[in-house]
Amino acid sequence: MNNIKLYVGRVFIMDNYKELIPEYLGFVKGVVNSDDLPLKISLEMLQQNKILKVIRKNLVKKCIEMFDEIAENKEDHK
């Protein structure tokens, strides 16, 4: 289950879009707000949008960075 919500310019676009984050990070919850996507966008356009691929890549990178930070500060997160 995908718990990432996609907003464009603070306007809700969709949630549970499976292509936004890999399946192995399905437990991650959050919000993505991007001004780079058009406000009126169809699902077909989203699937072909290069900006969405960059957002996905950055989400994975940010998750891994946060996991590393938590691992380094293990005592603080108990």
Image: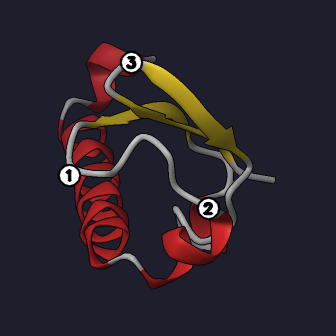
Q: Quadrant of the C terminus?
A: top left
List x then y, in percent, for residue 6: 51, 39
**8 left or right of 75?**
right
Name the residue type under label 3: Arg
Discs 3/1, front:
3
Residue at the spot 51% in from the left edge and 69% down from the top edge: 46
Instruction: Say which residue label 3 marks.
Output: 10
Numbered tag placed on residue 56 in the rendering: none
Q: Quadrant of residue 35?
A: top left
Give the alpha-carbon distance from disc 2 to disc 3, as whole Å.
Answer: 17 Å
Residue identified by numbered label 2: 42
Q: At label 2, which amino acid type do we have?
A: Ser
Residue type at numbered disc 1:
Glu
Badge 3: few (under 14), some or many (20 or more) residues near its Cα, within 10 Å? few
Q: At which x and y percent is residue 30?
A: 50, 31
Residue 65, disc: 1
What's the distance in space between the residues labelled 2 and 1, CA to CA? 31 Å
